[in-house]
């Protein structure tokens, strides 16, 4: 089966990401489950809601995750995931990452959640997250 390319506009930026192959997706899934657990469901559950509702939920999730993991661990996994995307037809690299997300952490979290949601739809559905409502 060929991998898919997923596309999304977030804050006027055009993002796309190639579906992860099993050798990348499975280790990442194990890391995410260990780190985010139930908080991941809450994070993804705010998609499509108002900006204010999303901001409150993002803050709540980050607080939960940060109390259970080191800041370095959390930052490392978010950055690893976000660096897999293209933005406005350019490969996300360190420079573009810093230019794009300086002062726009909410966009960073949205991109992270979107990549996770696209790559793990089947797993998320199995744990009871209804992606049709997002």
Image (cartoon, rainbow, N blue to C red):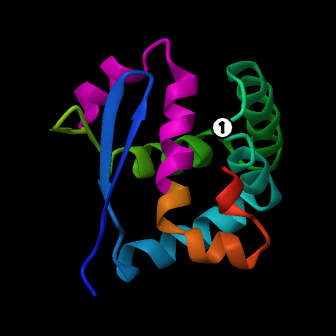
Counting from the top left corner in percent of width and height, residue 81 is at: 43, 51
Q: SS at mark 1?
A: loop
Q: Quadrant of residue 122?
A: bottom right
Counting from the top left corner in percent of width and height, residue 79 is at: 44, 43
Badge 1: residue crowd in 10 Å (few <14, some 14–19, many ≥20): few
Q: Which residues are magenta?
A: 93-115
Q: Quadrant of residue 97?
A: top left
Q: 23 or 20: which is nearer to us?
A: 20
Counting from the top left corner in percent of width and height, residue 36 is at: 72, 56
Residue position marked by numbered label 1 in the rendering: 48
Q: Quadrant of the N terminus?
A: bottom left
- Give the main secondary structure, helix, strand or loop, of the magenta stretch: helix
Counting from the top left corner in percent of width and height, residue 129 is at: 75, 65
Q: Would residue 80 appear left or right of 56 to someone viewing this image?
A: left
Q: Would residue 29 appear left or right of 53 to someone viewing this image?
A: left
Residue occupying image coordinates x 69% and y 73%: 125
Tell how many labels.
Answer: 1
Q: Is residue 113 magenta?
A: yes
Residue occupying image coordinates x 66% and y 61%: 131
Up the image or down, 80 lies above or below 56; here it is below
Q: Is residue 78 magenta?
A: no
Up the image or down, 43 lies above or below 10; here it is below
* Residue at the outermost bottom position: 1
Residue occupying image coordinates x 66% and y 60%: 132
């Amino acid at each position: 089966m060929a991998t898919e390319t997923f596309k999304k506009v977030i804050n006027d930026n055009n993002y796309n990401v190639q579906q992860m192959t099993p050798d990348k997706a499975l280790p990442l899934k194990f890391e995410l489950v260990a780190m985010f657990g139930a908080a991941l469901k809450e994070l993804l559950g705010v998609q499509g809601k108002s900006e204010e509702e999303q901001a409150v939920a993002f803050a709540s999730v980050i607080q939960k995750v940060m109390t259970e993991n080191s800041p370095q661990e959390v930052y490392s996994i978010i950055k690893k995931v976000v660096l897999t995307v293209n933005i406005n037809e350019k490969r996300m690299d360190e420079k573009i990452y810093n230019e794009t997300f300086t002062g726009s952490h909410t966009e960073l979290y949205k991109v992270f959640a979107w990549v996770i949601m696209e790559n793990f739809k089947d797993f998320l559905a199995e744990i009871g997250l209804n992606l049709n409502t997002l």
